[in-house]
Image: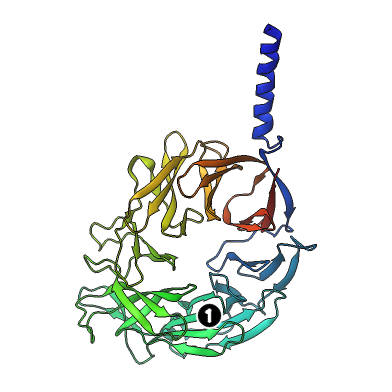
Amino acid sequence: MTLAVILGGIGSIVAFFLSAEGYLPWDAMLKSWAAAEDREAEVTAGDDNWVVGDIAVRSRYDAVSGYALTGDEKGEKLWEYVPPGRSEICDRAEHAGAGAVVVVQDSVGSDNAGQPSSSCTTIIALDAKNGRQLWKEERKPGKDLSDAAALRNLGLDAGGDLAVVTEDRRETGNDAQERSVKKDGERGEATLRGLDLRTGTPRWTAQLPDRCGPDEIAVGDRRVVAVLSCDAGGRDRREVSELTVAVFDRTTGALKWNAPIDARRPLDPATGVSIEAVDPLVLAIGTSDKNEGVTGLFASFDDNGRPHPTIDLSQGDDGVIDADSLMQTAVSGDRLYALAGYWSKGNHHTVIAFDLKTGRRAWSEEMDDPAAAMAVNNGRVTVLCEWSTQASAITTLIELDARDGDETDERHFRDPVPSPVSAMYEADGLLVTAGRGGGAPFIAWERW
């Protein structure tokens, strides 16, 4: 009897370590394939990855590449576009469409002082299947330096068969509150244009609200959303400069509605605002010295522009949501899912689901290990966790039911997932993780 207890204890210990290392069936994640490793590179604003059909696209400052996700070539690089000469990729369309849209930074030229200058001037659309150039649009700045600077703030997004390009050539000045804002000047006004993603043919030019220009842009399945920086004065009798959010018809570009982001007080144009989701519309709002009481929050709106209750980034004892970092939030249906982190002898995280219509929690689940990334797919919340509160090796996968937060699966990676993870996809029954910088850009994992 004593021997059986001892052997049972030893077996439990061995099973625990085998499970933690990914060596037990029904408890492991095994590497199925990995794309060839890239050289180390500085992460820039144009870096991103997304999936178009069965092709994973990766954008870096020096190249855009397409990788097969399925078939005999899965994991292989199918094509690569390298910008000519000394030009670079300086921006990209963030969302998936019928092709890959990027902006090439043209480094040829000099400013009025004879120094080399650059600006994002050329839009290239590439076929996601083979990297073939579909169309190109070159945008030429004028001789004035501020005009060239305006092209650096180009806005671009794509979805389905639509690409949307924004440009703001308004002159920078100060409003009545001595805040730096854009003002209409001789160099032209702000524009928001819709183009056919496959051909580059113009579809529409939106009529922007008076004295407003786009800061952020996102294309959804049903509409186009823009965060607008609006100047004081004008036909709408706006007394102060502020940020608003506008929704445009995807087919015609017609303005459906334009509403203040904060209905209580004008939101200062210097505030950082990002579009978390389009359908439903969710914004992440940062802090600003000139916005009293705004400490960072999520704001959402119904289809008619009416605001829902806001959600604070700070969640008390459960931690703070880092909306600026990758893979910390996700929107699915009428819910916002987020990782709230806090420090207590190491990093800790809580997964929280919020009801967007009420702003209240639907559920929360504390992770045993610190969370590095989160995604929501097919009714599951997938969380990648690190092996201890003071380590950065991703070794564990936790899956929660998106409806109630109940844990449905826990598995361990036999080979640690390279960190940081910038995206997770489901392809051919496998979990695909995307990395940034050097290393393998895409790795596929199978459940074992």
In the rendered image, the quadrant that contains the N terminus is top right
Image height of 193 relative to 51, above or below: below
Choose between 249 and 213: the one closer to the eye. 249
Location of the C terminus by quadrant is top right
Q: Is residue 21 above or below residue 201?
A: above
Left or right of residue 158: residue 297: left
Front residue of 109 and 309: 309
Give coordinates of residue 5: x percent, y percent: 66, 12
111 with respect to 448 (left or right): left
What's the residue at 49%, 84% (across, down)? 194
**Side of 432 where 405 appears, left or right:** left
From this view, report whether residue 128 is shown above or below residue 3. Answer: below
The percent position of residue 107, horizontal first and vertical second, equals 58, 79
Q: Secondary structure at mark 1?
A: strand
Q: In the displayed image of the protein, which residue is found farthest to the top?
A: 2
Q: Residue at x 60, y 49 (%)?
A: 419
Instruction: Farthest residue to the right: give it.
Output: 72
Q: Is residue 260 visible?
A: yes
Badge 1 local density, few (<14 within 10 Å), some, or many (20+)? many
Image label count: 1
Look at mark 1 in the image and give the residue it sits on: 163
Q: Position of residue 207 (x, y in %)?
A: 37, 87
Q: Three-letter amino acid code at disc 1?
A: Ala
Give residue 109's position: percent from left, percent from top. Answer: 56, 85
- Which residue is rendered at x = 66% and y = 38% of the image? 27
Q: Quadrant of residue 410?
A: top right
Q: Quadrant of residue 433?
A: bottom right
Q: Is residue 140 visible?
A: no
